[in-house]
Amino acid sequence: GDGGAIAISAALENNTTLTELNLQADARCALQFKISATGAQAIAKMLAANRALNTLNLAGNSLGDEGAQHLAAALPHAG
């Protein structure tokens, strides 16, 4: 969920080794355990700073339009 996304994003801002991150939500996962726009905002902040990560899977989460916008805005700065 969002709490986990925020925590892992903070930990990975200065990451130099992890290149792939799978945060895919199981289809059976309850909505409160999925990443929403709040978690996506934290992930976007991490992507803007992280230079090693090149693959991120967020399939099955509930990012919504707002979450997608946060991530899209971070992509020109990633890598």
Image (cartoon, grey):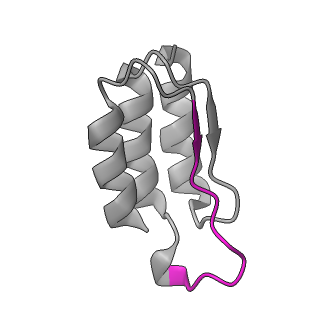
Q: Is residue 65 magenta?
A: no
User: As drawn, is 63 to the left or to the right of 70?
Assistant: right
Q: Position of residue 74 (x, y in %)?
A: 48, 28
Quarter location, residue 2: bottom left
Report the label total: 0
Q: Which residue is drawn at 40% across and 56% down?
A: 39
- In the image, the segment drawn in magenta is 20-31
Which picture quadrant has residue 15?
A: top left
Q: Which residue is drawn at 63% across and 67% down?
A: 25
Residue 8 rendering spot, x and y as whole percentages:
35, 48
- Find residue 3 and report its horizontal and vertical position in percent: 32, 64
Please indicate whether residue 30 sits to the left or right of residue 27 in the image.
left
The foreground one among 13 and 70 is: 13
Q: In this view, does 20 lie above or below 24?
A: above
Relative depth, front residue between 78 and 18:
18
> Could you tell me which quadrant the N terminus lies in?
bottom left
x, y (%) of residue 63? 56, 60
Residue 22 covered by magenta stretch = yes
Residue closest to the eye, 64 or 26: 26
Q: Is residue 58 left or right of residue 38?
A: right
Residue at the limit of the structure toward the front, as seen here: 17
| In the foreground, 7 or 76 | 7
Placement of 42 over or under 3, stated as above or below: above
Q: Residue 24: which quarter of the image?
A: bottom right
Above or below — where is 3 with respect to 9?
A: below
Q: Main secondary structure of the magenta part?
A: loop
Residue for point 35% across, 43% down? 9
- Residue found at x 40% / y 22%: 50
